[in-house]
Image (cartoon, rainbow, N blue to C red):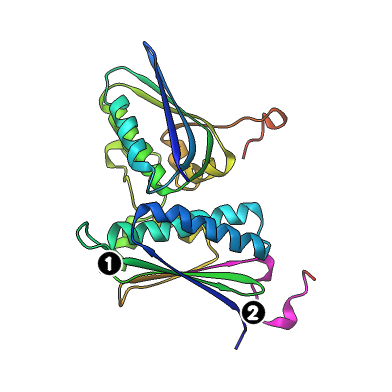
């Protein structure tokens, strides 16, 4: 099995900790050598996943925890965000995400629901599992030309 | 990780200067401020985002509600001096076609922003 470093954090499911997690994430991504632009993309995508977990997973009376894991590989960063609260209907959500259309009347504009759309746009690979709570697994490659898994085919960079 | 909001209210236009980060935590305060302003009749609300270095979809949501409120009250919402990275989110989501948004213009890059 491929070797990697692993960092795990647990935060209370509260909005004030989203920024704390962003700092940790910037640190890890910076150490791995991600570009400034990629780090900004990562920050938005991971914040969206955590914000979703904070907003949807728990009601006001019951505050839980969110687990965030970083899998640090030589060529990529994998981030998993898991809540242990209620699950949502993925098909429903998928129908509600996507960019705005300029012709849509303003009254119909959604005020939320961009989270998953942004995660999908900003990350290289996204997998969502909602069997037990919601788990979002996101991957960002260090160099986008290096997406091939086969070692002998990576020749573009040294 | 915080957001500072500075409001200077004039006769016709109100300028809201923001500095810091707009996320799930800071968006609540921003939404309150902007809705109070855009719920007034015939106002021009200009939001200056020059010093906003981070924003996510919660920020987009706040600006969408402020836009709705301003339309209902014949007011106008305008976002100016948006940093390139933050402006990108308006573009990706198509909101740049709907909200009056202006990216920051740097001296050396007057024509080809983004």
Residue A149 is marked as 2
Residue B64 visible at all? no
Q: Can you give x and y, in whole percent of width and height, for residue A51 in the image?
A: 37, 56
- Residue A39 lies in magenta, yes or no? no
Instruction: Count all numbered tags in the image, as a single digit.
Output: 2
- Residue A140 lies in magenta, yes or no? yes
- Taking the spot 35% from the left edge, 62% from the top edge, the residue there is A12
Stretch of the chain drawn in magenta: A137-156
Judge whether A23 appears above or below B32 on screen: below
- CA distance for labels 1 and 2: 32 Å
At mark 2, the secondary structure is loop
Tag 2 subunit: A
Q: Nearer the viewer, residue B95 or A15?
A: A15
Query: Mark 1 vs mark 2: same chain?
Result: yes
Judge whether A126 appears above or below A56 on screen: below
- Taking the spot 33% from the left edge, 33% from the top edge, the residue there is B66
Residue A99 visible at all? yes
Q: Which residue is mark 1?
A: A88
Q: State which quarter of the image contains the C terminus of chain B.
A: top right
- Taking the spot 27% from the left edge, 37% from the top edge, the residue there is A107
Tag 1 subunit: A
Q: Residue furthest left?
A: A61
Q: Residue furthest bottom?
A: A1
Say left or right for B97 vs A15: right
Q: Can you give x and y, in whole percent of width and height, for residue A133 in the image?
A: 30, 72
Q: Quadrant of the rendered structure where residue A92 is? A: bottom left
Judge whether A30 appears above or below A1 on screen: above
């Amino acid at each position: 099995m491929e070797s990697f470093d692993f960092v795990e954090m647990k935060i209370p499911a509260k909005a004030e900790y989203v920024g704390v997690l962003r700092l940790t994430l910037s640190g890890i991504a910076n150490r791995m050598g991600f570009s400034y632009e990629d780090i900004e993309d990562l920050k938005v995508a991971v914040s969206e996943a955590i914000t979703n977990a904070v907003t949807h997973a728990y009601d006001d009376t019951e505050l839980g925890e969110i687990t965030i894991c970083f899998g640090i590989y030589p060529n990529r960063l994998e981030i998993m965000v898991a809540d242990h609260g209620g699950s949502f209907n993925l098909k429903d959500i998928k129908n509600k995400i996507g960019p705005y259309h300029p012709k849509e009347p303003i009254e119909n504009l959604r005020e939320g629901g961009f989270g998953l759309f942004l995660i999908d746009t900003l990350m290289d690979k996204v997998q969502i599992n909602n069997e037990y709570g919601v788990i979002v697994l996101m991957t960002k490659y260090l160099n986008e030309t290096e997406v091939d898994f086969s070692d002998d085919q990576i020749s573009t960079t040294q | 990780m915080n957001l500072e909001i500075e409001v200077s209210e004039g006769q016709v236009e109100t300028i809201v200067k923001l500095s810091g980060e707009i996320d799930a935590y800071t968006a609540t305060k921003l939404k309150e401020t902007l809705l109070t302003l855009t719920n007034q009749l015939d106002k021009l609300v200009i939001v200056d985002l020059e010093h906003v270095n981070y924003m996510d979809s919660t920020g987009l949501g706040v600006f969408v509600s402020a836009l709705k409120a301003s339309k209902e009250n014949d007011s106008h919402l305008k976002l100016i001096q948006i940093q390139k990275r933050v402006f990108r989110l308006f573009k990706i989501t198509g909101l740049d076609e709907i909200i009056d948004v202006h990216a920051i213009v740097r001296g050396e890059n007057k024509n080809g922003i983004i």
